[in-house]
Amino acid sequence: MKKILFSLAAAALLVSCGNSNKYSVTMTLPNSDLAGQTVYLLNYDTEDTVASAVVADSIVKFEGSVEKDFLASMDGRTVFVVEPGEIIVKDGEASGTKLNDALASLSGTVKSIIDTANGIMMDVHSGAIDSAACANAMDSLNNVYLEAFKSVYEANKDNSLGILAFTGYVQNEEMTLDEIEAELATAPVVAQSKQVGKIIDVLRKEEMTAEGAMFTDFTVIDADGKEQKLSDYVGKGDYVLADFWASWCGPCRAEIPNIKKIYEKYKGKGLTVLGIAVWDKPEDTKKAIDELKISWQQITNAGQVPTDLYGIQGIPHIILFGPDGKIIARDLRGEEMIAKVDEVMKKK
């Protein structure tokens, strides 16, 4: 009898242990456009496919077991945490489990910060506050934002929510690479994240191509099948103003008139202006060059090669190179760019 009771107890324990790592994700989509289609649950960090399911009307449900929680999304939509329990995803927010509830709280804080920031901008436009008061208020909001992500990270260093919180924190806080790596030494789960690894790689590239560093060369095949190198232009005795841009990028297009002023002022006087079309289709680049009446030299079809090498995360990104190829300034824009070029050309 005792053996039977022991066997039943062991079986119950096995069932209990087997169910303890079960998860279900029930996601309500905005509409029924995907009804009947197969969609995929992806590991947000590794980008691996974890599971698949068929959408019924506007509902999709994923089920499985998980040994360790991980960040996930459905075909790139709404990031949430897969962990044991019943997870409900609706209106772009996950709830029902410990880490997802914590993530929802963080999301609520971020939304509140954005609403407050929008209100401050409206006050500036209406004249209710001046620019100095706006700057002070925005600085305070930024501190609240950073503290929110930092506190969530520190409370979740040993799980996947810590990865998400750390990336949000480190991408908006001025930390040196050494400081980041020292912090990651205390959080091995976060340190092993591929997403965090990408951030570290970008920071290393930025450090290698910081002001004062020698230019890093690259080679691409342009739209005409011609091999082009950055060294075809940089390090040849002239200053070079290099504009990393794309046809679809509104801020890039808005910067063209400023670059045009510089080009017309210093053409043939020891300054080369160079466009480097990245993240763009060659035909779209050519159309934009014609539309914007761009007459300076271009390296087209550069893809991600230059931006990866220089740790560029957003465009336009404009770099001023010295006659010897050293980087004088990065991320120049508008009047600051014009003033910087005027400054170095006066010394020539």
Image: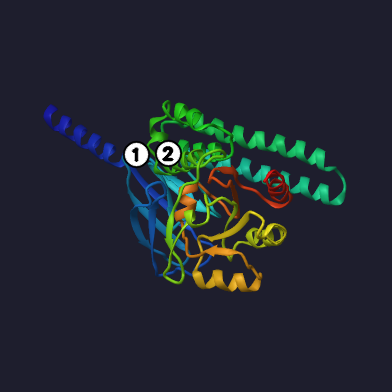
Mark 2 burial class by Cα count in 10 Å: few <14, some 14-19, many 20+: many
The relative height of residue 162 versus residue 318 in the rendered view (above or below) is above
Residue 341 vertical position relative to residue 285 in the rendered view, above or below: above
Asked whether 223 or 314 is in front, the reply is: 223
Kindly check if marks 2 and 1 are in contact, taking CB atoms under 8 A apart as contact.
Answer: yes
Q: CA distance from mark 2 to mark 1?
A: 9 Å
Observer-nearest residue: 97 or 178? Answer: 178
Which element carries disc 1, helix, strand or loop?
A: loop
Left or right of 335, for residue 198: left
Q: Residue 330 placed where, x, y %?
A: 60, 45
185 relative to 236, above or below: above
Asked which secondary structure carries label 2, the reply is: helix
Numbered circles on residues, count: 2
Three-letter code, disc 1: Lys
Residue 160 is marked as 2
**Label 1, on which residue?**
68
Kindly indicate the quadrant of the structure image that contains residue 191: top left
**Percent of width and height locating residue 98:** 47, 37
Q: Residue at x 71, y 52 (%)?
A: 334
In this view of the protein, can residue 88 be seen by the observer? no
Disc number for residue 340: none
Q: Quadrant of residue 182?
A: top left
- Could you say where residue 188 lies in the image, as x and y percent from the top left? 38, 31
Q: Amino acid at mark 2?
A: Ser
Name the image colouring. Answer: rainbow
Estimate how packed mark 1 is, as few (under 14), some (14 to 19) or many (20 or more) residues with alpha carbons within 10 Å: few
Which residue of the protein is positioned furthest toward the right in this rendering? 127
| Residue 241 seen in the figure | yes
The mark lying in front, picked from 2 and 1, is: 2
